[in-house]
Image (tube, rainbow, N blue to C red):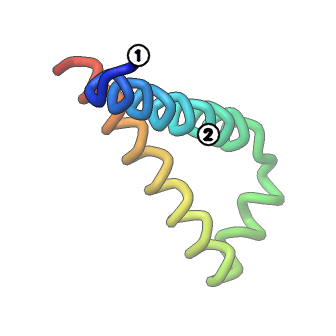
Amino acid sequence: MITTSEKEAIQSVKYKLFIIQYYEQFNHFLNNIDDSTKHLIKKNKQLDTMYDLFLDFVLDSGQIVETDKKA
């Protein structure tokens, strides 16, 4: 039988895997954006805002996972 603390640990691992998966996908995407697309994003206020929100979320999530690894 799985204890409550084991269930919590499993849930934590699931969250971390989810974050890591999208963190890596987004970083890969960022590294492959061509210059014309970057220009389009920067010139469109709504796209730029959305891009910044996604970037902040992904980078901050990655930092949380890294901090948890060190603890």
Q: Which residue is at a point 52% across and 54% down the rendered structure image? A: 55
Q: Residue furthest front?
A: 1
What residue type is disc 2 on? Tyr
How far apart are the alpha carbons under marks 2 and 1? 32 Å
Q: Residue at x 50, y 31 (%)?
A: 14
Residue that appears at 56% across and 75% down: 49
Secondary structure, mark 1, is: loop
For the N terminus, give its image quadrant. top left
- 59 sits to left or right of 35: left
> Residue 63, how many percent across, how many down?
33, 37
**Looking at the image, which is closer to me, 49 or 43?**
49
Position of residue 54 relative to residue 42, above or below, is: above
Q: State the residue at coordinates (61%, 39%).
A: 22
Name the residue tied to disc 1. Answer: 1
Q: Quadrant of residue 2?
A: top left
Q: Nearer the viewer, residue 63 or 34?
A: 63
Considering the image in quadrants, where does the C terminus appear?
top left
Tell whether 9 sits left or right of 52: left
Residue underneath mark 2: 22
